[in-house]
């Protein structure tokens, strides 16, 4: 009996109890708890798809959007900036709550208040409703897409107009229940809506604490404008609010209402921040959250799918060149903005290992320790690499902030520019775009394949890192590569640890309990037979890729190449995304002319590239398959 009582007590004290959704109202806003009264799933006919609840609040409540005001890292950073600039504390908090607690900030502004502070936010359940329903659905389209709309420059008018994506809305129930008038407007489905807060320019101060300009802290919308996605009609909502084409009944009120709306956009808002979602899930009671652990589990599952399927692709090539193993790792950005995205605290890197037949690691770059710090990384920051030849060189894709004197800084209001920003740009990204100075790449000037194809044309959204590894063993080697990601760099947490504030201390406690092991975005591996043969004679000048005939071709073509000196060569076929489609040759060649029959019978029509590779050099040509 005592054991049963003890177990029950243990359950009582460890259960994470969620708060209710807020139902407070103001002259402008209404808490999400009022919206759920009508826009909730009834389990059968309303906001239900294939038996699953797809109601907006169910998906949204465990997203980063819903918890923007309760994010412990954000609160810690606001506190840190206030410690650095105590005379500006009210201005800092008012600026930061504009997008992280918009219901509180916009109402305070409407009421004529000069400031809206963190203390005011924490005292208001409605302000703590995050980026809530009646914020996004009331943003007026007037200035959207213009500079004035950025950095929280959204406009909320006092007319209590709720914008939606459907024509001819039934207005009566909403007027009666919450005093809003629903209106159709297509702007609700555009990237410009998201850009009001996800395009952020912050003021920065010089070493004399004088304002010195504005810094583009977050610019995914402007990056998207400089990509193929904006030209192809792909909006932020396309990925972050995936749609259902089936007709959906979106309201339980009135009961006789059976109008089906299509498409329906799921309010999932999945991104890449599994780190914070996990922290929120494990501290529901402590942080006063309105989502349950099961809600967070579902959001984390969608976020994991997003990061593993829609962020980056990874491909691997390797061959022996004399006494060296040459490995080429290609990363391709699949997103419509730079990756990593968002606040410039994040990083992505390549972890590459080479193992022998017994499993012993003979080379490793990009390992990490128990604190999540990357082994071998330079103490200040790791430069971008086109070629890696030692284990203490690591390819890290990251923004590194510089103050007005060009020195490293972790303080956002000191950030005047970048020492390094080699985040992978989206496909189509060009230095000739009118916005390039705002979203410029830094620190990759010597890398001739960063966002550049073999013809010197920008816009691949990809990068190839070459590794040259001395090998003294023969036999099969296993080459493994993975792409690692962290929401927050450990050195930034170290920076916070020197500051004293309750919000900083809370984040540090939660951080220590959780740890900071990286998320793995992509993985691949391959085997290579290494021999003792010296293949150094196969130089870049000793082989020629002559071409293929016919070209264009229908299923069959012949690729011709010439080898001057004996050596090991590979002949591979790639698609336009850089994925290996076929390995046609991978063998030792004597000098002479070679012809290889290539069949595209199992491939779709399109542009393909074939590459002859030896001694760390490749020759590439294009062919067109037309069926």
Image (cartoon, helix red, strand yellow):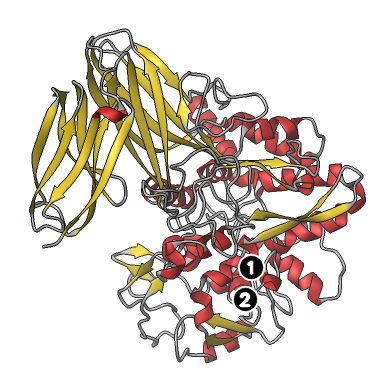
Residue under circle 2? 144
Dot 2: what SS? loop
Viewer-proximal residue, 7 or 218? 218
Does residue 119 appear anywhere in the picture? no
Q: Is residue 509 above or below residue 140?
A: above
- Per the image, the residue denoted by label 1 is 196
On the image, the x and y values in percent for residue 279 come to: 57, 41
Marks 1 & 2, CB-CB < 8 Å contact: yes
Residue 7 percent coordinates (x, y): 50, 31
- Is residue 202 found left or right of 432 in the rendered image? right
Image: 364 above or below 532: below
Residue at left offset 46%, top offset 21%: 389
Residue 144 spot, x, y in % from top left: 62, 76
Q: Residues within 10 Å of mark 1 (few under 14, many from 20)?
A: many
> Can residue 434 be spotted in the picture?
yes
Residue 157: quadrant of the picture? bottom right
- Among the 4 quarters of the image, the one containing residue 563: top left
Say left or right for 62 vs 77.
Answer: left
Q: Residue at x 57, y 62 (%)?
A: 222
Q: Is residue 561 left or right of residue 115?
A: left
- As helix, strand or loop, the secondary structure at mark 1 comes to helix
Along the line of sight, the residue nearer the viewer: 186 or 418? 418
Residue at point 73% right, 76% down? 26
Mark 2 Cα shell of 10 Å, populated few (<14), some (14-19), many (≥20): many
Q: Is residue 316 above or below residue 297?
A: above
């Amino acid at each position: 009996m005592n054991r049963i009582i003890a177990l029950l007590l243990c359950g009582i004290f460890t259960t994470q109890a969620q708060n209710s959704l807020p139902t407070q109202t103001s002259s402008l806003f209404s808490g999400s708890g009022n919206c759920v009264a009508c826009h909730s799933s009834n389990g059968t006919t309303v906001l239900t798809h294939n038996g699953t609840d797809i109601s907006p609040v169910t998906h949204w409540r465990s997203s980063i959007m819903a918890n923007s005001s309760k994010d412990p890292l954000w609160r810690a950073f606001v506190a840190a900036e206030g410690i650095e600039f105590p005379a500006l504390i009210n201005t800092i908090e008012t600026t930061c709550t504009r997008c992280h607690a918009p219901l509180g900030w916009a109402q305070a502004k409407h009421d004529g208040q000069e400031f809206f502070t963190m203390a005011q936010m924490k005292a208001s359940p409605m302000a703590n409703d995050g980026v809530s329903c009646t914020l996004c659905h009331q943003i007026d389209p007037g200035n959207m897409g213009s500079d004035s709309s950025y950095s929280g420059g959204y406009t909320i008018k006092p007319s209590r107009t709720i914008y939606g994506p459907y024509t001819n809305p039934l207005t009566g129930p909403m007027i009666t229940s919450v005093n809003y008038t629903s209106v159709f407007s297509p702007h609700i489905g555009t990237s410009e809506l998201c850009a009001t807060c996800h395009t952020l320019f912050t003021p920065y101060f010089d070493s004399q604490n004088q304002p010195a300009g504005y810094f583009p802290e977050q610019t995914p919308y402007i990056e998207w404008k400089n990509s193929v996605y904006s030209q192809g009609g792909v909006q932020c909502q396309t990925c972050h609010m995936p749609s259902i084409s089936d007709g959906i009944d979106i309201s339980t009120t009135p009961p006789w209402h059976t109008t089906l709306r299509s498409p329906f956009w799921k309010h999932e808002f999945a991104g890449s921040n599994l780190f914070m979602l996990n922290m929120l899930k494990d501290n529901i009671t402590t942080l006063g959250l309105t989502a349950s652990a099961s809600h967070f589990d579902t959001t984390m599952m969608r976020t994991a799918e997003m990061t593993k399927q829609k962020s980056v692709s990874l491909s691997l090539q390797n061959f022996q060149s004399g006494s060296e193993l040459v490995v080429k790792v290609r990363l391709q950005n699949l997103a419509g903005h730079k990756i990593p995205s968002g606040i410039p605290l994040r990083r992505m890197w390549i972890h590459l290992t080479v193992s022998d037949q017994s499993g012993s690691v003979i080379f490793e770059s990009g390992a990490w320790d128990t604190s999540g710090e990357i082994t071998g990384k330079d103490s200040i920051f790791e430069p971008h690499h086109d070629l890696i030849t030692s284990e203490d060189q690591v390819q890290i894709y990251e923004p590194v902030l510089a103050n007005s004197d060009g020195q490293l800084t972790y303080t956002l209001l000191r950030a005047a520019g970048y020492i390094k920003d080699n985040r992978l740009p989206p496909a189509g990204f060009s230095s000739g775009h009118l916005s390039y100075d705002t979203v410029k790449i830094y620190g990759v000037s010597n890398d001739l394949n960063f966002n550049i194809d073999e013809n010197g044309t920008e816009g691949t959204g990809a990068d190839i890192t070459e590794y040259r590894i001395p090998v003294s063993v023969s036999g099969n080697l296993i080459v493994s590569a993975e792409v690692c990601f962290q929401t927050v760099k450990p050195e930034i947490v170290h920076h916070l640890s020197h500051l004293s504030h309750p919000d900083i201390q809370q984040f540090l406690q939660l951080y220590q309990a959780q740890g900071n092991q990286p998320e793995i975005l992509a993985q691949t591996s391959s085997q290579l037979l290494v021999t003792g043969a010296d293949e150094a004679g196969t130089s870049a000048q000793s082989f020629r890729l002559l071409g293929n005939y016919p070209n264009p071709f229908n299923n069959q073509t012949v690729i011709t190449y010439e080898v001057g000196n004996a050596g090991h060569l590979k002949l591979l076929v790639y698609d336009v995304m850089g994925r290996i489609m076929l390995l046609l040759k991978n063998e030792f060649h004597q000098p002479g002319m070679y012809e290889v029959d290539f069949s595209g019978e199992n491939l779709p029509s399109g542009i393909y590239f074939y590459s002859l590779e030896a001694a760390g050099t490749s020759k590439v040509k294009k062919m067109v398959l037309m069926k």
